[in-house]
Image (spheres, rainbow, N blue to C red):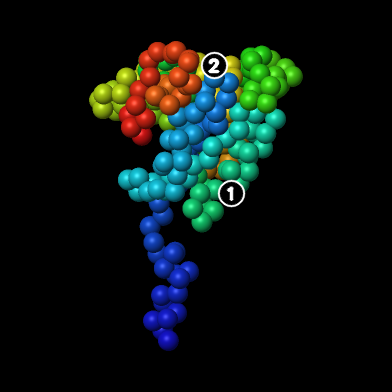
C-alpha cells in the first residue's frame, strides 16, 4: 500500500526532471513559395526531444488577421503537459538569400505587401504605442558561430524586413515582455531549398532540405 502511494503517476511525474520546452514555428506556402521549407522543418522536428529539449512546432498562417491570435493561443497552451515554453524560435524563408540570417531586432513597422489572403495592413506600425525596436533574447553571436562551424553560411541580420516575419517577431517579443518568467525569443531566416519554388521560377541560391534540418 505504501509503495502504491509512493509511486502514483502524479508522484512519478513530479520526480521526473523537467525538460526544456522549445517552440518552433514556420509559415505556410505563400506567393511564389509553393512549398515553404520552414513548414517542413517544423513538421519534421515537432514532438521530438533534442538534447533534453522537448520541441513543439506550429505552422502559422501568412495572415495579418489571424497570426497574433494564433500566437497568443499557442503560448497559453504551452508545451508538453501544458508547461510554459522556455524558448521561442521562429523561422521564416528569405527568398534569394545565400545565408541563414539570425535576426537581432524586430521593428514596429509594417510594409504594404499583401499577406497570403491578399490583405494589406491598415497602418504602417504594428503597435501604436510600442517601442520602435525590440531586441531578441537568444545568443545571436553564438548561434551564428555554431552554424558557421558546421558549414552552414550564417550572418547576423539587423532587419527582419517589414513583412509577416518581422510582424511575428515583434509580436512575440511584445507578448513575452509581460510574463513573470518570459521565454527567450529569436528569429531565424532560412534560404530557399530545392522544393521551395515551382520549376519555372528561378532564384539563387537554394540548399538541400537536409542542410536545413
Q: Residue furthest front?
A: 200
Q: Is residue 4 visible?
A: yes
- Residue situated in front as seen by the camera: 131 or 16: 16
Residue 99 horizontal side relative to residue 103, left or right: left
Q: Is residue 102 visible?
A: no
Label 2 element class: loop
- Residue situated in front as seen by the camera: 155 or 116: 116
What residue is rendered at 42% in x and 86% in y? 1
Q: Which residue is mark 1?
A: 77
- Residue situated in front as seen by the camera: 138 or 68: 68
Q: How many marks?
A: 2
Give the spatial CA distance, label 1 vs label 2: 29 Å
Residue 38: x and y, percent? 47, 31
Q: Which residue is mark 2?
A: 161
What residue is rendered at 45% in x and 79% in y? 5
Residue 128: x and y, percent? 71, 21
Above or below: residue 176 compared with residue 203: below
Q: How dense is the environment of label 2, judged by Cα within 10 Å: few (below 14), some, or many (20 and up)?
A: some
Residue 30 sits in quarter: top right
What residue is rendered at 44% in x and 64% in y? 14
Specify the label residue 122 is tagged with. none
Residue 180: x and y, percent? 56, 43
Circle 1/circle 2 CB separation < 8 Å: no
Q: Earlier in the sequence, mark 1 or mark 2?
A: 1
Label 1 element class: helix
Q: How dense is the environment of label 1, judged by Cα within 10 Å: few (below 14), some, or many (20 and up)?
A: few
- Specify the quadrant that holds the C terminus: top left
What residue is rendered at 39% in x and 81% in y? 3
Amino acid at each position: 500500500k505504501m509503495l502504491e502511494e509512493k509511486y502514483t503517476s502524479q508522484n512519478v511525474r513530479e520526480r521526473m526532471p523537467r525538460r526544456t520546452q522549445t517552440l518552433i514555428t514556420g509559415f505556410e506556402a505563400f506567393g511564389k513559395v509553393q512549398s515553404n521549407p520552414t513548414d517542413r522543418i517544423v513538421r519534421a522536428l515537432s514532438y521530438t526531444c533534442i538534447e533534453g529539449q522537448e520541441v513543439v512546432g506550429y505552422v502559422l498562417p501568412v495572415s495579418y488577421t489571424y497570426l497574433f491570435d494564433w500566437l497568443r493561443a499557442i503560448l497559453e497552451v504551452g508545451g508538453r503537459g501544458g508547461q510554459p515554453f522556455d524558448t521561442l524560435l521562429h523561422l521564416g524563408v528569405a527568398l534569394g538569400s545565400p545565408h541563414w540570417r539570425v535576426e537581432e531586432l524586430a521593428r514596429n513597422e509594417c510594409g504594404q505587401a499583401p499577406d497570403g489572403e491578399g490583405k494589406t495592413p491598415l497602418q504602417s506600425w504594428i503597435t501604436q504605442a510600442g517601442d520602435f525596436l525590440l531586441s531578441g533574447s537568444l545568443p545571436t553571436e553564438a548561434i551564428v558561430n555554431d552554424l558557421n562551424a558546421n558549414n552552414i553560411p550564417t550572418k547576423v541580420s539587423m532587419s527582419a524586413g517589414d513583412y509577416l516575419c518581422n510582424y511575428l517577431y515583434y509580436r512575440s517579443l511584445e507578448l513575452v515582455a509581460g510574463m513573470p518568467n518570459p521565454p527567450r525569443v529569436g528569429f531565424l531566416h532560412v534560404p530557399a531549398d530545392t522544393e521551395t519554388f515551382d520549376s519555372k521560377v528561378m532564384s539563387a541560391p537554394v540548399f538541400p532540405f537536409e542542410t536545413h534540418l
